């Protein structure tokens, strides 16, 4: 993966607009939280292969971390804290947010075909 390039990511998002796509969204602090604080709670969310169509997509951020929002007919999907991106298998947009130690904290992936289980 490489650091997010706003214009390139926005173009990829625009390419998926108004198409039925598969979304993967994941957030986690996993076991990381309890390594340094035994009172910390592990939290996370995981959604894989949700079929959606979004009519607007936008990436915003301050140069350190970014938020991507996908506007659907009835609401929004968004991921915040994104730092890196790559095009995988020629057409899948993979966005991820890593902490200072390189551990995954958030992921947003978009594809016209389902992701592998």
Image (tube, helix red, strand yellow):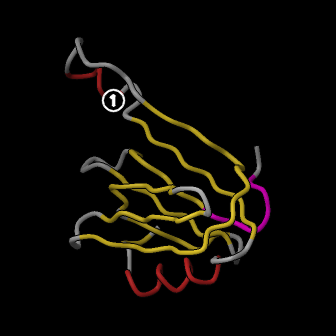
Q: Is residue 2 left or right of residue 60?
A: right
Q: Furthest-front residue in view?
A: 74
Q: Is residue 52 magenta?
A: no
Task: Look at 62% across and 68% down and name the residue there.
Answer: 54
Residue 113 is covered by the magenta coloring: yes
Q: Position of residue 88 (x, y in %)?
A: 64, 69
Q: Which residue is mark 1?
A: 32
- Out of 14 and 4, give the one closest to the viewer: 14
Judged left or right of residue 87, residue 62 is left
Q: Secondary structure at mark 1?
A: helix
Q: Main secondary structure of the magenta part?
A: loop
Direction from residue 62 to residue 91 in the image, left or right: right
Q: Position of residue 90 (x, y in %)?
A: 70, 77
Q: Is residue 29 above or below residue 106?
A: above
| Number of numbered markers | 1
Q: Residue at x 36, y 55 (%)?
A: 80
Q: Which residue is more in the foreground, 56 or 117?
A: 56
Q: Residue at x 73, y 74 (%)?
A: 19
- Residue 48 lies left or right of residue 109; in this view the side is right
Q: What segment is highlighted magenta in the picture? A: 110-115
Q: Residues within 10 Å of mark 1 (few under 14, many from 20)?
A: some
Q: Position of residue 14 (x, y in %)?
A: 57, 82
Tell me where residue 43 sits by quadrant: top left
Q: Quadrant of the C terminus?
A: top right
List the single residue furthest toward the top: 39
Q: What is the x, y in percent for residue 6?
A: 37, 81
| In this view, 112 is above or below 108 | below
Look at 21% across and 71% down and name the residue there: 62
């Amino acid at each position: 993966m490489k650091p997010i390039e706003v214009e390139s990511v926005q173009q990829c998002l625009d390419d998926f607009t108004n198409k039925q796509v598969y979304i993967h969204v994941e957030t986690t602090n996993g076991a990381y939280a309890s390594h340094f604080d035994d009172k910390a709670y592990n939290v996370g969310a995981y959604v894989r292969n949700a079929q959606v169509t979004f009519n607007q997509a936008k990436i915003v951020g301050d140069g350190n971390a970014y938020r991507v929002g996908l506007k659907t007919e009835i609401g929004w999907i968004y991921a915040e804290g994104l730092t890196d991106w790559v095009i995988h298998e020629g057409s899948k947009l993979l966005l991820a947010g890593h902490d200072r130690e390189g551990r995954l904290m958030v992921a947003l992936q978009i594809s016209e075909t389902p992701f592998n289980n």
